[in-house]
Amino acid sequence: MRVRARRTATSTLVVLAAAIGLAATAGPAMAGVRQDRGIEPMAAVSYNVCGTTSNLAAAGTDSKVEVRLRGSQGASPFIQLDNPNRDDFEIGHTDCFPNIVLADLGVLSSLDVRFTRLSGDDNFEWNLSHFTVIATGDPDAVFPCQCWFRATQTRNLRVA
C-alpha cells in the first residue's frame, strides 16, 4: 500500500512538473517513474534581453529593474536584470543580459517592466528608451517605452 501511494504522489509530481515545463529536469531525478502519460516537456529557448536607457539628463538609475516576457504560449516569471560588478542602466547605455533560458514562450507580444525604487538610491528615477529581446531563431522583438519610472511601479510594453 505504501509503495502504491508513493508512486501516485511521484507520478503527480511528474505530471505537474511537465505541465509547467520542467519535465526535462524532473525526469532524471525520478528514476523508475513512467513518463508515458502523453505529456511532452516544453522546449527551452535562450533569450537575450537588452535595455536601453535614454540620453536625457538624469535618465540613469541604480534601482532594481525586473522584466517578465509574455508570448503566445505563456509568460515568464519576473527576472531581475543585474550584471554583477557593473553599473547597469546608465544614461545612453544599452545593457544586455544574455542567455536567459526559459520555456518557449512562443511569439512575444509584450514585456512587463517592474521598477523598484531602492531606499537611499540617489538615482531613483529612470527614463527607459526601449527593450529589445532576441530569442534563438526568432526575429528581434522591440518594446518601445520613452517613459519615466519615478516610483515603484510595473508597466506593460507592447511589441512594436
Image (spheres, rainbow, N blue to C red):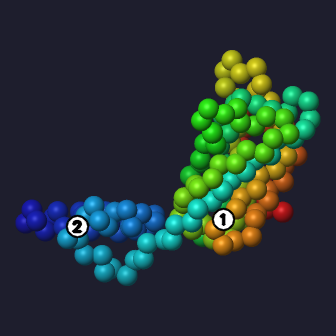
The vertical placement of 100 against 45, above or below, is: above
Instruction: Give the residue drawn at x 23%, y 71%.
Output: 33
Query: What residue sits 92% from the left and 35% below the top?
Result: 56
Answer with left or right where residue 50 lies relative to residue 75. right
Measure how far apart labels 1 and 2 are at the Cα level: 32 Å
Q: Residue furthest front?
A: 85
Q: Position of residue 99 (x, y in %)?
A: 59, 56
Residue under the point 19% across and 67% down = 7
Helix, strand or loop at disc 2? loop
Locate the C terminus by quadrant: bottom right
Q: Label 2 belongs to which residue?
A: 31
Does the image show residue 24?
yes
Amino acid carrying mark 2 in the image: Ala
Under mark 1, the amino acid is Ala
Q: Residue at x 76, y 63 (%)?
A: 141
At mark 1, the secondary structure is: strand
Where, quadrant-wise, is the N terminus in this rendering?
bottom left
Q: Point out which mark residue 135 bears.
A: 1
> x, y (%) of residue 65?
68, 39
| Residue situated furthest top in the rendering | 120
